[in-house]
Amino acid sequence: MHHLLLIFGIFHLPKVATLKCYECAAGSSGSCIDATKECPPLADQCGALRLIVYGGTLSTCDEVIADVNGKSCTFADHCVEVSVNFGATRTIFTNRCCTTDLCNSLPAPDISKSRPNGKKCFSCNGLQCTTSLDCQGNEHYCVTAIVDVKGQSRTMRGCASKQMCSNTQQLAALIGAQVSCCEGDYCNSGNTQRAAGLLLVAATLLSLVMLH
């Protein structure tokens, strides 16, 4: 009798509600066409993604190289606003999240127009890496990246947000760079001590937060 009651109870348990979000693949045109998707059990957020890459010179880094939007189910720890600024290039990634069905209808905002925050780091102008760079927004760390360009090592220095400077060595290996971060004005003048991963390419950034 007890077994029959248990089986009856299992079949009449309320179903766990599955979050439903808008989903659209990121596109270089800056927009995407919405579809709806039921999220996997552990994905408890709906996200609106945006990646903007600026290029130019150290003094005028204002040319939009890429402006990519997307929407997806995601996880709470992927809901970030991060940026990395090398002076002549600046990459800003936003994932705005919410927790109710289809709440990610609006695109992620453009947070690139942030003000200097008082932090200063070194940046490189050619082979010279002694140029002063004003960090912006949540860029509270100095960063050094050593990348391979046609078989030659090239050093890049600049500012980065805290999330960019998390200990993600696997990502650093993915993008083919040695990356380090530090705190304190102009602390990236030489070798720094904290290993870090750096989100330098749009495809890597979006693949980290979008669920397929």
Image (tube, rainbow, N blue to C red):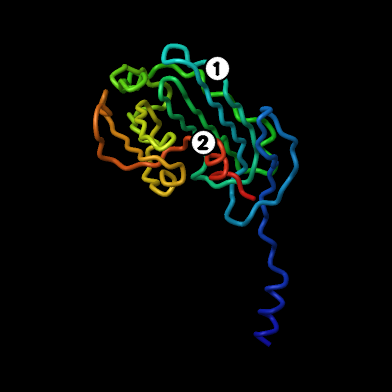
Q: Which residue is mark 1?
A: 63
Res 106 quadrant in image = top right
Residue drawn where x is 44% and y is 45% of the image: 171
**Among the two numbered marks 1 and 2 on one chain, the one whose residue lies closer to the N terminus:** 1
On the image, the x and y values in percent for residue 145 come to: 36, 34
User: Is 189 in front, or is 76?
Assistant: 189
Quadrant for the N terminus in the image: bottom right
Picture residue at 36% right of the left edge, 45% below the top: 167
Task: Tell me which amino acid carries mark 1.
Answer: Glu
Q: Can you name the residue that lies furthest to the top here?
A: 59
- Tell me, yes or no, if residue 28 can be seen here: yes
Q: Is residue 196 depicted above or below 144 in this figure?
A: below
Percent across and percent down for residue 155 are 34, 30
Figure check: 7 above or below 171: below
Q: How many marks?
A: 2
Q: For residue 163, say whether it is visible.
A: no
7 displayed left or right of 126: right
Q: Spot the residue most to the front.
A: 151
What residue sits right under mark 2 in the picture? Answer: 201
Classify mark 2: helix, strand or loop.
Answer: loop
What residue sits 52% from the left and 15% below the top? 62
Residue at 63%, 46% (x, y): give it: 73
Q: Nearer the viewer, residue 97 or 51?
A: 51
Q: Amino acid at mark 2?
A: Val
Foreground residue among 146 and 69: 146
In what element is the residue under mark 1? strand
Image mark for residue 174: none
Give the camera-side residue of 203 and 168.
Answer: 203
Other residues around mark 2 within 10 Å, as few (<14) / some (14–19) / many (≥20): few
Circle 1 Cα neighbour tier, 10 Å, few/some/many (<14 / 14–19 / ≥20): some
